[in-house]
Amino acid sequence: MSNIIEIRNLTFKYANDEGNETVAIDGLDLNIEEGSFVAVLGHNGSGKSTLAKHLNGILQPTDGTVLVAGMDTRDENLITDIRRQVGMVFQNPDNQIVANVVEDDVAFGPENLGVEPAEIRRRVDEALKAVDMWEFRSHAPHLLSGGQKQRVAIAGVIAMRPRCIVLDEPTAMLDPAGRAEVIDTVMRLNKEQGITVVLITHHMSETINADRLIVMSDGRIVEDGRPEQVFANVQKLRDAGLTVPETTQLIYELRREGIDLPLDALSVEACADSIYKAFA
């Protein structure tokens, strides 16, 4: 499978008002395969949101290279094309909603890309159906729940037909029900439409079903693999200032008591089944 994003020796430094520099990303190398679902986990200040903003040219590398579908994000002439390939969804859906009617909001992006009206209509309808918001197409966005607003924001991105969607902590402002709505939506888009998903989060439970989990700390990648492989390294994650899913924590403590259980039982069902078999 080909890579949609290729990052080589990415370094990014922030400068404060006094002119001092802080390294947010430190010599990072990363490839993201097209069609994959990649979750990026890390504590506040780990560099994960800074990484997200490099994936469609919002930020430019201090050093190193970011290629999106082979296009260098440092080339200003390519930024529009790059952003057609990679769409962004942010924490607060209210900051991304620009219209007074849901379907008009979803149409905003394609209109700015110069898409023909008939094609815009088709894309809006398809995008709203894809995120299960078709029945709300005539509603006012400000009357929707947080999860519904975020799904409208996602629809606005996919109406622009990107190959990849980067979601920068999209559930941070949502309640558990809203979080579940959003995660279920992006998982379905990935599996059914083959859209590459990069999910930036600090919620362990949102990463369990990803194809790949990347853990960041101090601007570097400290773990990279399938979620069950990464979460098996309980102590290393603790050293990075992170916890593990409650299921993994429970199994970890039982293993310390001498009970032979697999650390890769991440879901509640798998965890319960493993404990049942151990004591049966």
Image (tube, helix red, strand yellow):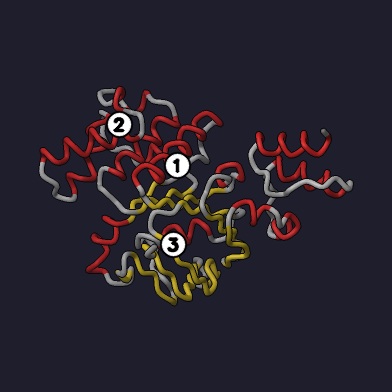
Q: Is residue 274 left or right of residue 220?
A: right
The residue tagged with tag 3: helix, strand or loop?
strand
Kindly tell me whether residue 20 is visible in this rendering: no
Q: Is residue 122 left or right of residue 239?
A: left
- Amino acid type at mark 1: Met
Residue 83 in the image: state x and y as whole percent.
29, 57
Which quadrant would the C terminus be assigned to in this image? top right
The residue tagged with tag 2: helix, strand or loop?
helix
Which mark sits nearer the N-terminus, 1 or 3? 3
The reply to whether the C-beta atoms of the residues labelled 1 and 3 are less than 8 Å apart is: no
- Amino acid type at mark 2: Lys
Which quadrant would the N terminus be assigned to in this image? bottom left
Kindly tell me whether residue 274 is visible in this rendering: yes
99 or 128, nearer to the observer = 128
Choose top left, top right, bottom left or bottom right for residue 235.
bottom right
- Amino acid type at mark 3: Ile
> Residue at left 70%, top 54%?
232
192 or 175, nearer to the observer = 192
Structural distance between the alpha carbons of marks 1 and 3: 16 Å
Choose top left, top right, bottom left or bottom right for residue 42.
bottom right
Q: Residues within 10 Å of mark 1 (few under 14, many from 20)?
A: some
Residue 69 in the image: state x and y as whole percent.
31, 65
Residue 262 in the image: state x and y as whole percent.
74, 48
Which mark sits nearer the N-terminus, 1 or 2? 2
Q: Is residue 203 left or right of residue 259?
A: left
Which mark sits nearer the N-terminus, 3 or 2? 3
Residue pointed to by mark 3 = 32
Residue pointed to by mark 2 = 129
Residue 31's place in the image compared with 91, above or below, is: below
